[in-house]
Image: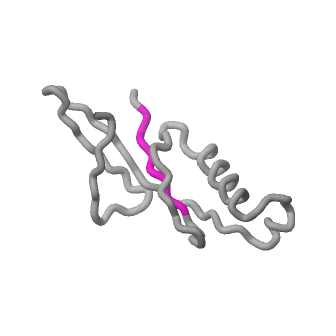
Amino acid sequence: MRDICLPLKDVENDQPVEVVVNVAGESRKYNFKVETFDWSITEEEMADHPFDKYTLRIQKLRDAIEKYDKNWEVIQIFDPGRESNYVQALFRLKGK
């Protein structure tokens, strides 16, 4: 088993969550956080690119992730819905 799902209540964006897991008696600690990124596209941005709105959104998210703190790695990107102006991503603190 490599993945588990833990529903958490009342966790704000950019608020780190520490999870301690015991595997065969060995304690392992993981740090996660969820970030929200604006991926709305303006009319001006649409006019400046030959791409469709959804391709521009993907590029905008890719750019935001590339600029993100390199100590954190993307684990999951949540489906924001077709017309949402924001997208959320789950990050994990890289192991030391």
Residue at image coords 85%, 59%: 50
Residue at image coords 48%, 57%: 78
Q: Is residue 87 left or right of residue 9?
A: right
- 37 over 90 or under it: above or below: below
Write the start and end of the magenta stretch as one range: 87-94
Asked whether residue 89 is drawn in magenta, I would say yes
Colouring chosen for the image of the structure: one colour
Q: Is residue 60 left or right of residue 95?
A: right
Residue at image coords 39%, 30%: 95
- 48 over 61 or under it: above or below: below
Q: Give the percent coordinates (x, y) of residue 40.
A: 65, 68
Which corner quadrant of the image does residue 48 belong to?
bottom right
Residue at image coords 69%, 52%: 59
Which corner quadrant of the image does residue 46 belong to?
bottom right
Asked whether residue 9 is drawn in magenta, I would say no
Which quadrant of the rendered structure holds the N terminus? top left
